[in-house]
Image: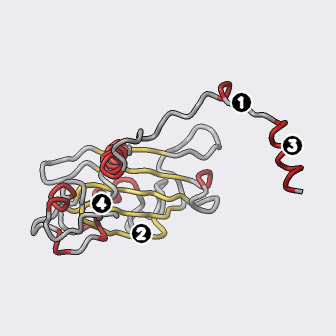
Amino acid sequence: MDSSYAPLCLYPANVELISRCILITDKSIYKHQDDQDHISLLFLPKISDSDSNIYLIETSHASSCCPQGYFIVYLFCEDKAKTNKNNFDQVINLLFRNASETESEKANVLFSYFFSHIDSGSLVKEMEKNESKPANLHLVSGAKVCLDFDHHVKEAKRIFKEICPDQEFMPRPPDPEDIIIDDNEETQSNKQSD
């Protein structure tokens, strides 16, 4: 079960948050030399110790996320400001058109949505040790502030080994040339079923 669905009694008093922002814009933040739509990925390092590194992903209609002519911009970071919108103000003001800018080549933000959630990645081990948690309940961390899924694969392997200790986790599939297909057996079984 995703740890965000765990009862609040399993959480420690102090929790860290992850801030997320979803924007819909009318232009790409990146000027492409060709007319193809692309997916843009930016890593924006923190400016000061009180800030967070911000990850930005921009997708076009080519990713089937939005209609042609629009772009989805997804930003996420550790929540240092304790108000999710403040985490992204500098980046949004830098990359997108402000209300005060009348003539600008920057993209317009047509829609914005800001939210925060608990970063349960560091809490799962503590929550697993909680005596009030049922023994058959396995908790996994939610989305983290990273671009890969290595942590989630390790968690899945740990839980799999707890449930099925004698089984191999994600066994390698056979090579296509090692698979033997016997058409005679299939034909005979089809005749018998008729």
Residue 6 in the image, given as x and y percentages of width and height: 26, 70
**Residues under labels 4 and 3: Cα distance?**
45 Å
Q: Amino acid at mark 2?
A: Ser
Kind of residue sitting beneath label 4: His
Which residue does the image show at 85% across and 50% down from the upper left?
A: 190
Residue 174 in the image: above or below residue 24: above
Bin the neighbour count of mark 1 within 10 Å (Cα to Cα): few under 14, some 14-19, many 20 and up.
Answer: few
Q: Which mark is residue 67?
A: none
Q: Residue 34: tell me if it is visible.
A: yes
Residue pictured at 30% horizontal, 46% vertical? 158
Q: CA distance from mark 2 to mark 1?
A: 54 Å
Instruction: Report how far apart the C-alphas of labels 1 and 4 lie in the structure.
Output: 39 Å
Is 152 placed above or below 135 here? above
> Are the residues at dot 2 and dot 1 in contact (C-beta closer than 8 Å)?
no
What label sits on residue 112 in the rendered view?
Answer: 2
Mark 3: few, some, or many residues within 10 Å (few <14, many ≥20)? Answer: few
- The residue at which mark 3 appears reads as 187
Of the two numbered discs 2 and 4 in the rendering, the one whose residue sits closer to the viewer: 4
